[in-house]
Structure formats: structure tokens, C-alpha cells
Amino acid sequence: MTQGIYQFPSDNVKFNSIEDKLPPFDIEAEEAVLGAILLDSEAIYRIKDRLKPEHFYVSAHRDIYQACLRLCKKNESTDLLRVTSWLSDHGILARIGGRNKLASVVDSTISSINIDSLATLIIEKAVRRDIIKTGDDIKRLGYETEIELPEIVLKLADKVQSITGLTSVKTKEELQKARYDRLLTHLKLIHTTVPDPAYREYLLLGLAQESALSPSALERIYTKSLTDQCSKLMTYEELQQAAKTSVREWLMNGLLPKRTTVLLYADGGVGKTKLVYRLAKNIIQGSNWGDFISTGEKRRILYYQGDEQESDMYEALETMGYTQDELQSYVRVRFRWNFEQLPILISDLNEFKPHLVVMDSLTFLNRFSFHKEGDMEYARPILELTGLATHYDTTFVLIHHANKSGESRGTTAIRNSVSEVWKLTKDSSNTATPNDRILEIDKSRSRSSGKKYRLVFNQEDLSFLFLGEDDIQGSPAELSTRGKILDFFYHHRNIKYEAIEIAHELGINHNSCRGTLNSLAIDGLISVQRRPSKANLHYLSYENSDHSTDSCNQNHAQLSDQRLLLSDQRQDNPETFDNADFEAEQSESIKKLDQRLISVSDQRRDACPKSNTGDADQPTSKNSEKKSALPKKISENDDQLDQRRPNDLPHNDYGADQAADQAADQGDQPDHLDQPTPNRQFPFCAENSTAKQTKLECPRTGLPLPQPFDIIVDGPLGRSVATATSLRYREDNRLQVQIEYEFADGKKRTRQGHVGKGKPEVEAIAREEITRWQNKALLLPKRRYQVRQLADDDYIWVNNCRLVKIPNPPVECWYVFEAPTGEQLRVRADDEFKLDSLNE
């Protein structure tokens, strides 16, 4: 049915009246705000710009607040005496209820700490009352047929404007930020969890339509969000602390940093892919490549190959000497992947946990991009890899092609998006052979850049022989010192030395030693721990993934700590060591600790023998042919300590196993490593009443562990308890913890993970897990609740209500229920509803 240009709705219009309900208000909140202002004269400055007198429902409260604003405007105190005097002088005191009213407001207030949230609540109630009033006005306008329709439309616009112009719960900036955060969350979810590119594009189009933005605008917003890596504003003390602890970690010292992105580019046929295959083999075996020393072995490698076929890659790896065990245990390969399938990469990172990811090549992997190679947006996937490298503790190597001028192809944003840039070229010197190559560190955020290294490519076994740094600077004596120091650190792994100690050990000049150490540290060939007001410590790290050497690591850490303690005492309290005999005794103690450290280091290397990799893998120094005599057996004490170590403890974060969550929600206990292992020789389970009385020790270090403790959370469904038990200290000094949950409905769940901030972090994790379970349990369709609502004179409980929405701050701050009548009821706190025992 139509009349003119207006089409009437087909549904019947309902004229149900709700005038018997009270308008929204919160008298307790109003009194609390006024009491806070009367108690604390500074509190009004936190709310005066957004809370207005007309927001108060009670007229007496409006008058009191107006008086406070007047006094505040004159820079006068808003204490009880001043406000009382002002109201009396203006003849308002009797109207608001006299001094008794003001006294009762003050007596019912404890502090002003929550005045901001209470003011927000009052404003929200006022907005709702204004909406109701505006709705009534609009309804009356509809009945006033003597007014022309265009005039009514104008009045409607004015009425709506009066609502939108009223100060709401949030400022405009806060609302915009909340919408932006919600949009960005949706974007990240779509980009990182939807593997099908077509379906992902469909979802993005729907999100663009919903947010009134174009798909290209969403793409730009997401790209720019990836560049948001700015740290917080640091004080000098914070910077000092960060510099003290932020030691660069390497897969291969001086070449492959951890948790970073590397771009290797070269012309076709130079051998860039074969070079990466070779380096990957080195870090699997823990062997060295010239001056570049591996920091561990048995590293996992993930290849994403696009430029080579399966047969070509298999033949290349076989030719290079990859063993079947290496290929089976430490290598995974995926072909024809592209950046549009980012969720597949995230799944592989979670499942395989690679130390190094090789992507060949950037052009192939980005072949479905809508952007040209010269566009800035072409580099967006690299920014995503940067975040993944940090989050998943891995390093990405991107193989790329050079352009006609010999530089990296495409936009400069590609180069700017990575942390390291390597350039591989043929040696163009007159004396060079066709197989000579130059590897240039073109850009680096981890070491010095601009240096070049000479290589020889062997086409028979596809290996690269490392010849050394090209045009290395320094006299023969300086180069000899450099070789001695590298060789010394190679045979004294994980032992930290000061420059003066190295000089003494090798019999070289202290100043020359210190300069050489600085040069090696700048090139990343050794690690340095900078200590404010103390001498720097230099070392060459080694990480062993074989658990059989945990006891060696334990002894090594304890001995190294003792050694550093003696050294620091000599620097912090030099007057204590004026006695020559005592000085000699301390020096002798340090020497003995050094010998024990060397022995433990040799035991650790002997426990995991390295493959024979040839001369090219040894450090290039004149002492590189030395081989230390390695004992064949670890001490009995170490074996006993190793037996106490928990077997196969997972190094995952809390809540990582989503399948276990689902199983627990269904009442099943997950059957995997999250469950306690029965044969462990120290108490894990909270049910063991003697566990909390037993002195726990770390099986790796022997240090005492924190005692188990309970986290108790009371909620609408009852009491949930989490029992936290410490298991061990990891090598990174984080504490391995097991948390056993017993939820209010009787279901149980066990989680393991590691924390770095002690008990507060464990409590936060446990409370988050319990809250997550509680939110799921509250929303079960079968559950019914009693909800407290304000009636005419008092609160009443509405029975048989179903929960349809839980709070999700800052977007939604209410529990929303559906009453049997279909009406929606909202409450803010979880003590305003309870289980309906008749319907549970």
C-alpha cells in the first residue's frame, strides 16, 4: 500500500505502552559522585568537563553538583563546609534536604577512586532518559496532523540532533578508537586464519561494506598497522636496563641472527639457493662456515620452494650430503605456497616450530599480489613475516632476484622491510675464476654492514668454500690476535670473559685485545654482554637441543655464576683485594673454575658429536687445527641429575592447545603431554597433600622451587580453584609451571607453560583461564538465571531468564538476559544475577 512516494510498512504497527516502567537512573551512583567531590576537592576536575548538572536524575543532586561547579570555577575548595555555606547563601540548602542530606551523602562514600566510572554510568542513564523523552516527543508529533509533514521532519532532525549532541558514555575519540580496534581485530583474524584466498576476499568485501570503507582502504589500514612497532617512551633507567639484557642471539654468529628477516638477492645462475641449502645444512649439523660459528645443532629447517621442482630440490639436497636422518627429522618442505596462504604458514610454524624458514623466491611467492613489484604495498607480506619471526622465534630467509643494474628488484620498501640484506655476485676481478663468488653484507641491523667475503662455488657437490673476508684490514700481528681470540672462544663456549682476562690467557697486549674484541663483537662473531659501570663480558654461545646434556648445562651455569661473582667482587670492592696473598688466592680460584668450565664444555660437546664437515667448516685461524681432548663420559652426579629431569616437558604457552580446551568443555580429559607424567620423581599433582609440604628443587639447577599455591575464583556458578605447581627452571631462567584447574561444575583440566614474572603472572593466567571457562559455561542454552531488577520501591528478582550476551569491554559492558516475556534485561555486575535453582 502506497500513497505518493511513501511506502507504508507491511507489518502491523504495535502501539504497546511501557509508561508503567521507571526511567533509567542510579541514585547510588549520583550520591557516590557527590560524596567523592565533597571528600576530595581535586576529584571534580576529573569529571567536570563531561558530567553536567542535567545528567543527574534527582533535582537535589543537580543543585549540589551545580554548587560544586560554581566553587570550582572560582578555584575554591568543594569540601563539605564550603558547599553547605554556598547553598545556604543562595537559599537552596533547605530545598535539597538541609545539612542532613549533605552529611548522609558524605557518610555513604568511601573514596573518590571510582569517580570516573560512576560519572560514565550517570551520563549513560541520562542519555537513555533523553532517548525516552525524545521518543515521546516524536510520537506526539506523529499525532499532530495539523502540522505539515516537512515541518515535522525538520523537528525530528532537531530532536535526534539533541540526542547525538549530548555527551555520551565515551568521547568521540574513544568511540572511534574502539571502532578501529574492532575493525583491526577482524582484519587480522581474516588475514591469519582463512587459508582460502577467494573466501578471504569475500569476507574482506563484506567487512568493507559493513564498515563503509573500500577494500583498498582496508588493505592500506592493515598494511600500516603492521608497521606499528614503536616501543614505549623510555626513561634513561629503562634504556639502561634494556641495553643490559638485550644481547643479540644468533643461529650462526655474525651471519644468521635469531628472530629476524633476511633478503638474499643475486642474478640467476649464481647459486643463491644452493648457498642457503649449504648454510641450512651447517646449522642442522652444528658445524661452522669459516669465521661464522654455529651456536647449536639439530636446528629445524622449513623450505617453501617455488622456483625449483621437487626432483631438482631432492637432487640438490642429496648432492650436498644431507643424510636421511637429517632430512627426515629436521627438514620439512612445501611447494607452490604463496603469500595469500598465510594461515598455512602460521599452522606450519605452530606444528613444526622451525628455527629457519627459507622462501624461494619472493617473486614466486608473491605472484598473486594485486600490486606491482615497484609498489610499496608489494612489501606488505614481508612486514607480516617480521612479526611472525618475533612471535614464533624463527628466522626467515627470502631469496630474491637482482635487476639489470645488479640491485634488488622491485620497490625499495622490500629492502627497508627486512633486517638483513645479502648480495651474492660473481667475482669480477682479473684473477677470479668462473666459480669465485662475493657475498656482501649489504645491510644489517645486527652487525656491521658493507663487508664482503670471498667464496668458491664447487659445482660437483654444490658446496661453497669460505676463503675469508675480502680486503681485510689490519697488520699480521692484529690478524694473528684475531685468530687466537676466535680459536680461544671456540674451545671455551658459554664462558664469559673480560678483555683483561683474555689478554692474560693468550699473553697479548690488553689494549690490542680489547680493540680486537670490539671489532669481533661489531661483526657479530662473538657475543658481548654490556654491564653498566662494569667491564663488558665476551663469549661465544652454544645451545644444545639434546636433553642428555642438561646436567652439563646445570654444572656449567653454576660454575660460570661463581666465576662472575668472584670477578665482580674484585671490581666492586677493590680495597678488599689490596692484600697480595688474597689477590693471588682469588686469581687461583678463578683459574680453577676456568678449568672446570672447560671440562664441562668439552663434556657437553662430546655428548652430542658433530658430523665431519671438512676443513671449510673450521674457524679460519692458525690454531684452527687444534682439537681438544674430549672426555667420553659425563660424571655420575650429572647422570643422577639428568634422571630427575622431567621427560619431554612442552615449551608451549598457556592455552595453546585449542583441541584440549574443546575436550575439557565436553567433559573429557585431554590425552597428551599437558597431563602429569606418572613416572616423574617429584610431586606435581595438587591432590597429593604432602606435595605442598615437600621442599621442591629444580631437577636442572638444584635450586629450590616456589611452593605450590591455590588461586580461588568465586563466580555466579560457584567456586573454581587452580593449583599451581613449579616444575623446573628453564635455561632461559623462565619457570616451568603446571596449573591444575577444578572448575565450579566439577570438570578438571591441566595446563603447563612457562612464566617470567613469578606468582603474579601465574595468577593472571589462571584467572584468565577460569574466566574463559566461566563465560562459556554461563552461555549454555539450558541454563536459566534469576536477574535483579529495580521495581517501584525495591529490587526484585526476575526468574527463568536466559543469558544471551556477556560483557566485552570496552565495546559492551553489560550482561544481557532474555526474560520469559521476551524482554531484554541488562545488569553490569555478576552479583546482580544468580542461577535459577528451579530451572537448573
Image (cartoon, helix red, strand yellow):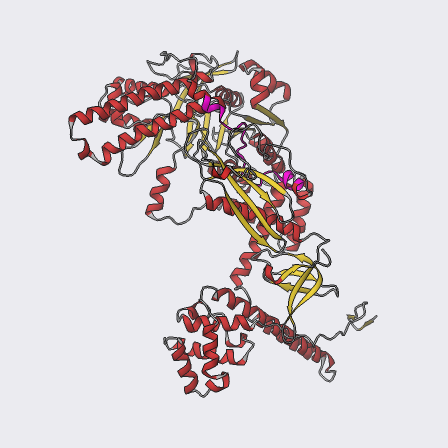
Q: Nearer the viewer, residue 719 or 394?
A: 719
Q: Is residue 434 left or right of residue 798?
A: left
Residue beneath the point at 66% across and 57% down: 805
Q: Quadrant of residue 213?
A: bottom right
Q: Nearer the viewer, residue 358 or 837?
A: 837
Q: Position of residue 764 (x, y in %)?
A: 51, 47
Q: Relative to 469, say whether 442 is above or below.
A: below
Q: Position of residue 69 (x, y in %)?
A: 44, 76
Q: Is residue 359 left or right of residue 290?
A: right
Q: Position of residue 68 (x, y in %)?
A: 43, 77
Quick check: is 656 in the magenta stretch?
Answer: yes
Residue beneath the point at 47% across and 66% down: 115
Q: Quadrant of the C terminus?
A: bottom right
Quick check: is 674 in the magenta stretch?
Answer: no
Residue 443 visible in the current orientation? yes
Q: Quadrant of the N terminus?
A: bottom right
Q: Quadrant of residue 513?
A: top left
Q: Relative to 254, say whether 826 is above or below.
A: below
Residue beneath the point at 64% across and 18% down: 311
Q: Which residues are magenta?
A: 640-663
Q: Name the residue furthest right.
A: 1
Residue 465 visible in the current orientation? no
